[in-house]
Image (cartoon, rainbow, N blue to C red):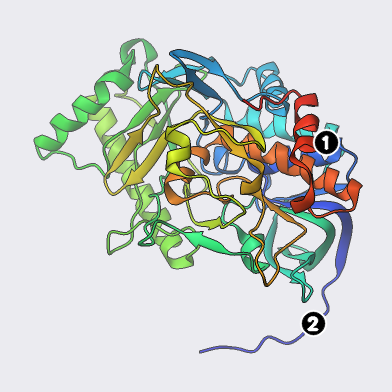
Amino acid sequence: MHLTESAREVPVVGEYDVVVLGGGPAGILAAASAARHGASCLLVERYGFLGGMGTAAGVTNFCGLHANVHGDIRQVVHGMTGELLDRMRALDGLNEPHLVLGKIHAQAYDMSAFKCAADGLLLADGVELLFHALGVGVVADENKRIGAVLLETKSGRCAVRGRMFIDCSGDGDVASWAGAPMEKGDHAGHLLYPTLMFRVGNVDAARAGDAWRTIPDLMDAAEASGEFKFPRRGAIVRRQKRGYEWRVNVTQMRNADGSATDGTDMRSLSAGEIEGRRQVIDYLRFLRAKVPGFEGAYALEIAPQLGIRETRRLVGEYMLTAEDVLRCADFDDSIGVNGWPLEIHVAGDVQWVWPLIPESRGFNHLPYRMLLPRRSSAGGVENLLVAGRCASMTHEGQSAARVSGGCFVMGQAAGTAAALALRRGSSPHDLPAELLQKALRAQGAYLG
């Protein structure tokens, strides 16, 4: 059954050089870097705060800022990311990096500090923020050039015009609406499984100790006894800035047929949220019953939404592959680096695949071409860049570069490229990589 919606006039509420949809790590730095290069910029975000999966999905942990370089773990994502981290540190909201699986560092943070630091960074650069605005479509001409993004807000439907657009939505919304080529899942359509993150409070940190080392064995014993059943192996239970507060990454959402919950399907997503909260309560029972120091723990916060790892991905001028990650690939048009391994969330488990350690340098270049929709004989979308987990990567390649470190790199490059292309009066496709690289180095970015 279908209804016919009456035609209506949609008010245009602003015109900008650059419009960014999505306020996660990629969107934050895309907007800030575009504005810093002189472009008027609007950042549109569906929630009332920035951070994307890092806040709305409760991730509270930066992955991909570091790489294992011939056995030496070092930070490899710099530039404007460093400015954001400094702002978080000034708010006492950033942990020291911690070791993951004995091979690489991640860095936990306080969610409120991330939200506030992101606000401060963007406002300092003159970015206009529009919260509580959900993108619902684009207006484009016969040549696929985007003229405006359509938004639903509490003030009603409206449009914002732009000369250049950057899709940091995570789901490739703008690119999909504009008719850019997209992929979803692996060759069989299988997506990475989502997780509903949660935090627990009232943990006795002294008694808990290094609980993350013992919890996997405790889970195996509890499952073997039949007392508990867990949605997946590979639980991550780590302390936050304050020892009485720990974050938990263990749930896994799937549809009735066992396939991964789809973040672009309203019914799948709704069922996943409900199932996620059920799993949270079950796991909290396990922590209280079996893990020293967690006897009085309670659910401090369940994330506002599922942590979606993969939906639509752009088919761009280049697609980053698993081989690129594992062989630490070089690209002449490098915009920065990714040091995170393949992290493939399959049914009931997490598969980690690493570059050779310590034999390899531990990071791959991220090419500028992965931000650009593929041109074809029929043309392409010329005034659009795509950054973040929906950029141009294969299913396996995306499992590595989707994390926050890679998203920060792509966002800073996309915003800089958009502003430079506008200044030259060209499509981002025709922007010489060396000009972009020069601008990124001037901002302190590390290109590998």
Relative height, residue 366 to residue 172 (above, below)? above
Q: Secondary structure at mark 2?
A: loop
In the image, taking residue 60 as reference, residue 14 lies left or right, namely right
Residue displayed at 9% across by 35% down: 225
Q: Earlier in the sequence, mark 1 or mark 2?
A: 2
Identify the image quadrant of residue 135: bottom right
Q: Residue furthest left?
A: 225
In the image, what residue type sits under mark 2?
Arg
The residue labelled by disc 1 is 123
Q: Nearer the viewer, residue 271 or 150?
A: 150
Relative height, residue 232 to residue 199 (above, below)? below
Residue 301 in sight from this viewpoint: no
Pointer 2: residues within 10 angstroms few (<14), some, or many (20+)? Answer: few
Residue displayed at 31% across by 12% down: 207
Residue 11 in sight from this viewpoint: yes
In the image, what residue type sits under mark 1?
Leu
Q: Nearer the viewer, residue 246 or 339?
A: 339
List x then y, in percent, for residue 381.
72, 63
List x then y, in percent, for residue 12.
87, 66
Q: Which mark is residue 240?
A: none
The residue labelled by disc 2 is 8
Residue displayed at 43% across by 37% down: 198
**Alpha carbon separation for disc pair 1 and 2:** 34 Å
- Figure label count: 2
In the image, taking residue 326 as reference, residue 74 lies left or right, namely right
Quarter of the image with the C terminus is top right
Q: Nearer the viewer, residue 136 or 207?
A: 136
